[in-house]
Amino acid sequence: MSISSIFRKFISSQPYASERDKAADEALLIKSAAIGDVKTIKKLIRAGVDINAKSKVSSTGATAVMYAAEGGHSACLQLLITEKADLNAKDNDGATAAMWAAGSGQTECLQLLVDANVDLSAKSNNGLTALMLASGNGFYECFNVIETHLLRQRRIRSPPVIGTA
């Protein structure tokens, strides 16, 4: 076996030839999640890309899960959930994927995250929760998804409406 064939075999067994290749694949994963490209995400996962990589292109430090949740790309989000992505990761502002979904009114994606038992008590660096973001932005369906889950989780009954028996 020649040295060049040994070298080629070694290089082909490595997931990345350089850190630059790795960063490019991670950026592609995040972009694919942002635009809802499930096919590319599947290919990148099979190639061994870190599904929890944080964006280095923007200053957000967001993950593919966050971009999929914000964009309403439920198929991408479901794939990332199935592949065991970190659903409670935080971006540079301390926001989670649930906050990204709730703050942009993506009820279906928020429901997927809630069903996967994300931490809805998490607070951003500004002290905001997903519930606060949903309410503050007028996304009442998202608010109801979170409230219903929290009430079930804590086994608390809704208080009676004033003026009713």
Image (spheres, grey):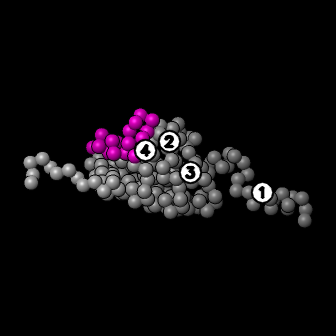
Distance CA(mark 1)–CA(mark 2): 33 Å
Q: Name the residue under label 4.
A: 122
Q: Mark 2 points at which residue?
A: 91
1 or 2: mark nearer the eye: 2
Q: Name the residue under label 1.
A: 11
Q: What stretch is highlighted in magenta?
A: 121-138
Q: What element carries label 1?
A: helix
Please state which amino acid type lies under the numbered disc 1.
Ile
Q: Dot 4: within a 10 Å radius of its alpha carbon, few (fewer than 14), some, or many (20 or more) residues?
A: some
Q: Name the residue under label 3.
A: 52
The first of marks 2 and 4 along the sequence is 2
Please state which amino acid type lies under the numbered disc 4.
Ala
3 or 4: mark nearer the eye: 4
The first of marks 3 and 1 along the sequence is 1
Identified at 64% across, 58% down, the residue is: 48
Residue 128 is a magenta residue: yes
Q: In this view, does 86 lie to the left or right of 2?
A: left
Q: Dot 3: within a 10 Å radius of its alpha carbon, few (fewer than 14), some, or many (20 or more) residues?
A: some
Please state which amino acid type lies under the numbered disc 3.
Asn
- Camera-nearest residue between 31 and 157: 157
Q: In which quarter of the image is residue 149?
A: bottom left
* Percent x, y of residue 19: 69, 46
Distance CA(mark 2)–CA(mark 4): 12 Å
3 or 1: mark nearer the eye: 3
Q: Is mark 4 on a helix, strand or loop?
A: loop
